[in-house]
Image (tube, rainbow, N blue to C red):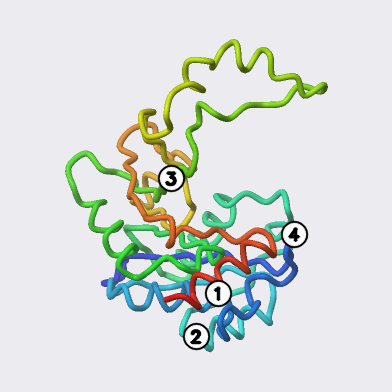
């Protein structure tokens, strides 16, 4: 039976992180990182179940204290560096279904995007109900033109890059096409579609939800965390 609040929001938060240890519970402006995402989800007023998937009791206790649901701990094989996000989502969905908890919609909210606001979650979900939209993924503008990027050969010689991109290199950045990148802050879609294609990037019907740069910080490294603290301090 599908629950009346038929939206499932999953926040994946494993304990291990080689680049920034214990980042999901590290204090950002005095609040554990994961709680920023839990609070944004609660304040979106979407009447959804907010479930944290973690392998650590310490993360589970903090998530529960912030108002999320942690119905079970993630198995060790899904807490490694090589475990895919989809496998984590599928494991959570299947275990909830075994408990009689079925949903129509799925939302993925990464705890490493703490500056994403409740309005972004609400607007992304609203976009999902427009014609032809089957999946929504959040994006943010690129800082620099992609035409000015390159891969470096072993000798670091740029001759081939310049030969191929000279016209673009002579063009002002504001005259080049505006480009966007995925920011990982919000993804949502219908569970049947996501499970069938094993991704939010569906073969058709995937639409972008644009977010401004100041809300699109993705924390992987210590300097990302420091930048997020700076942005929060200036609000």
Name the mark on residue 66.
2
Residue that badge 3 annotates: 200
Can you say which quadrant of the picture contains the N terminus?
A: bottom left
Callout 3: few (<14), some (14-19), or many (20+) C-alpha neighbours within 10 Å?
many
Callout 3–callout 1 Cβ contact below 8 Å: no
Task: Please state, as top left, top right, bottom left or bottom right, where the C terminus lies in the image.
Answer: bottom left
- Across and down, in percent, residue 232 comes to 49, 75
Of badges 4 and 3, the one in the foreground is 4
Q: Residue at x 23, y 58 (%)?
A: 126
| CB-based contact (under 8 Å), mark 4 and mark 3 | no
Q: Which residue is mark 1?
A: 34
Asked if disc 2 and disc 1 are in contact, CB closer than 8 Å, the reply is: yes
Which of the two residues, 216 or 147, is positioned nearer the viewer here? 147
Give the residue at x 36% y 29%: 175
Displayed quadrant of residue 104: bottom left
- Circle 1: element type: helix
Q: Earlier in the sequence, mark 2 or mark 1?
A: 1
Above or below for 126 versus 26: above
């Amino acid at each position: 039976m599908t629950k009346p609040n038929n939206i499932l929001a999953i926040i994946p938060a494993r304990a291990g992180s080689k680049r920034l240890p214990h980042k999901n519970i590290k204090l950002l402006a005095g609040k554990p990182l994961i709680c920023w995402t839990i609070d944004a989800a609660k304040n979106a007023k979407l009447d959804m179940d907010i479930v944290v998937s973690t392998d650590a009791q310490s993360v589970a206790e903090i998530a529960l204290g912030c108002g999320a649901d942690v119905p079970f701990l993630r198995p060790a094989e899904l807490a490694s560096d090589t475990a895919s996000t989809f496998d984590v989502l599928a494991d959570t969905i299947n275990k909830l279904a075994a408990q009689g908890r079925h949903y129509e919609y799925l939302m993925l909210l990464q705890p490493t995007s703490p500056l994403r606001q409740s309005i972004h979650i609400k607007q992304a979900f609203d976009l999902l109900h427009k014609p032809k939209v089957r999946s929504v993924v959040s994006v943010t503008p690129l800082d620099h033109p992609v035409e000015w990027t390159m891969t470096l050969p072993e000798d670091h010689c740029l001759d081939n890059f310049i030969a191929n991109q000279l016209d673009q290199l002579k063009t002002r950045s504001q005259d080049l096409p505006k480009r966007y990148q995925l920011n990982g802050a919000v993804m949502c879609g219908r569970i049947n579609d996501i499970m069938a294609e094993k991704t939010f990037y569906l073969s058709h019907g995937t639409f972008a939800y644009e977010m401004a740069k100041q809300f699109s910080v993705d924390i992987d490294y210590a300097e990302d965390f420091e930048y997020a603290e700076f942005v929060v301090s200036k609000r």
